[in-house]
Image (cartoon, rainbow, N blue to C red):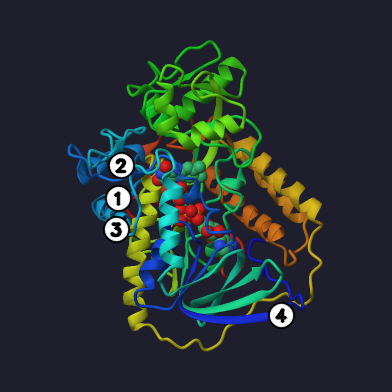
Amino acid sequence: MSAVPLISRSGADLRFSSYDVLVIGGGIAGLTAAIGAAHRWHVGLITKGDLDETATFLAQGGIAAAMGEYDSPDLHLKDTLEAGVGLCDEDAVRVLVEEGPARVRDLERLGTKFDRRDGKLILASEGAHSVPRVVRAGGDATGSVVASALAEAITSGTRVELHENEFVIDLLLDAGRWVGAISLDREGGLTVTLARAVVLACGGAGQVFAHTTNPLVATGDGQAMAYRAGAVMRDMEFMQFHPTALYGSENPTLLLTEALRGEGAYLRDDAGERFMVGSHPRAELAPRDVVVRHMKRVFDRDGTDHVWLDARHLDCAFLRERFPTVYNGLKARGYDLCTQLIPIAPASHYFIGGALTDTWGRTGIPGLFACGETASTGIHGANRLASNSLLEGLVFGDRTVRELNRYLSVSDPAVRKVRLDLANEPRQGNDPAMVAEKRKAVAQLMTDLCGIVRNKEGLAKAATSLGEIENSLVAPGLCVAELELFNLLTVARHIVASAAVREESRGVHLRSDFPERDDAQWRRHVLIQRDADTGGQKVYSRSVEES
Ligand SMILES: Cc1cc2nc3c(=O)[nH]c(=O)nc-3n(C[C@H](O)[C@H](O)[C@H](O)COP(=O)(O)OP(=O)(O)OC[C@H]3O[C@@H](n4cnc5c(N)ncnc54)[C@H](O)[C@@H]3O)c2cc1C
């Protein structure tokens, strides 16, 4: 199912455009790649929503980079490896931590105003960082400040042609090279975009789960397209759940940044106990996976599904100034951060899995590059260190540009023939109400059976239920909601299949039937690839050393 041509022959007009480089995605990774590539190449940038509908825009805490007096890339490396629980690619992490500070300075040159005191960058503390290391802007509005500076650079003065509100359906192939994409605009028109290189920077897939901090656009389109294109998908079982998201049914839910705990906020259970004290030497500032595990223990013990964030002991004026996004976001929802306990529960937040790339954004498929949350460079291992992902977008977006410069200097510029994989007949597609209902069903079953804690029976049931949902659908028509549902199903299948294979608990992957970490068997990555002959998915594993 996941390999069906997603494009229906609809009778819609086809438009054509062409660039040297097509970047898909306007978050930190895509914007960095597009701005850099535009110095030498004609660049097209397509985004599914407006430029501010990204995870990047929502980011609160900041960007981790070794820029403090008592910090060093080696210490940042050590913290990242420790948080990654034995699965990080150390070479990739070294690239991240060594190039990170220069990329943050690039952002400043571009106009980003990071928070400073007495002229010095203010560095925040977050979980599992051994020193204050997180550069921030606008208090807790780092993402919107950074995204606005990058967007400003795109819209004024670069040679990037921006196409917002255009949904890329799939990639286009010419003689084994990926040379463009077909996209659907709001009016239902299709555009064929040819390019000598394509950069996938479509962000994550938090919407696979019912309670998420991710924007509505995070439906795993980049991962699903990469898979259909033949890329190797890695670590798809690792979805990081953030411990402190506002409890409730809002989609997306409001994140309560880790920096709140960095400034001294507590986690409490129903009885008012600080359950992280005594559970981990760093208490509330333990790595995210550890905090989530202890929250789950409290849920099981107390028969509840949320705990409490307590900032009441902190100075209210300070909270309002330091955390305007969180303070005002809570106020708008009827909560007062200064005087009330805030109900919180874990929410899907960052997708560690993605299209396998090297440290130059190469997927191994000529012409196809990936960076940001869509990619798997190996820097996060089995658990991402807080605030390393904006840095990832900057560092690997930039390295993708450097590799594009090499690739485009030597690759054949001519596109010979592009095959449009259109269905033969116009498709009716699926009823919109049913599509909405199935999307909810996928998110709920993934939360119930493949969420924070997994086991063999639940995963088998999840696989069966996903199959039933697929079988209840006809092939998609030209409708974004339907196309997203098919991508969500593809990614959900990958998460379930990889989670079933990893028979241990490590980082963000918890198996109640295999509760221990098993280094003897499982210092391995789970990989998924489309079988070109059968169209089915191949699942296999490879040791960290072989990877
Ligand atoms: C609430 C929140 C807070 C966070 N806080 C932090 C933080 O403080 N520090 C940190 O390091 N990380 C943080 N993260 C994580 C971080 O924000 C993301 O990992 C990072 O921004 C991802 O960047 P990206 O460029 O890969 O993707 P995104 O910023 O998500 O952008 C994805 C882009 O792809 C486009 N796209 C997707 N599918 C298609 C398609 N089919 N066709 C066309 N375009 C498409 C979207 O329109 C969008 O433009 C946070 C995440 C969230 C959700």
Q: Describe the element under mark 3 as helix, strand or loop.
A: helix
Q: Percent x, y for residue 504?
A: 46, 36
Separation of marks 3 and 4 at Cα, in angstroms: 43 Å
**Kind of element beneath mark 4:** loop
Residue depicted at 71% across the width and 80% down the height: 13
Q: What element does badge 2 sit on?
A: helix
- What is the number of the mark on residue 109? 3
Q: As shown in the figure, which amino acid type bears the numbered disc 3? A: Arg
- Answer with mark 3 or mark 1, whichever residue precedes in sequence: 1
In this rendering, the label closer to the viewer, 1 or 4: 4
* Residue 469, image x, y percentages: 74, 50
**CA neighbours of label 3 inside 10 A, class few (<14), some (14 to 19), many (20+):** few
- Dividing the picture into quarters, in which one does residue 376 lie? bottom left
Tell me if label 1 and label 4 are in contact, CB under 8 Å. no
Dot 1 or dot 4: first in sequence order is 4
**Going from the N terminus, do you reach mark 2 or mark 3 first?**
2
Give left or right: position of 29 versus 97: right
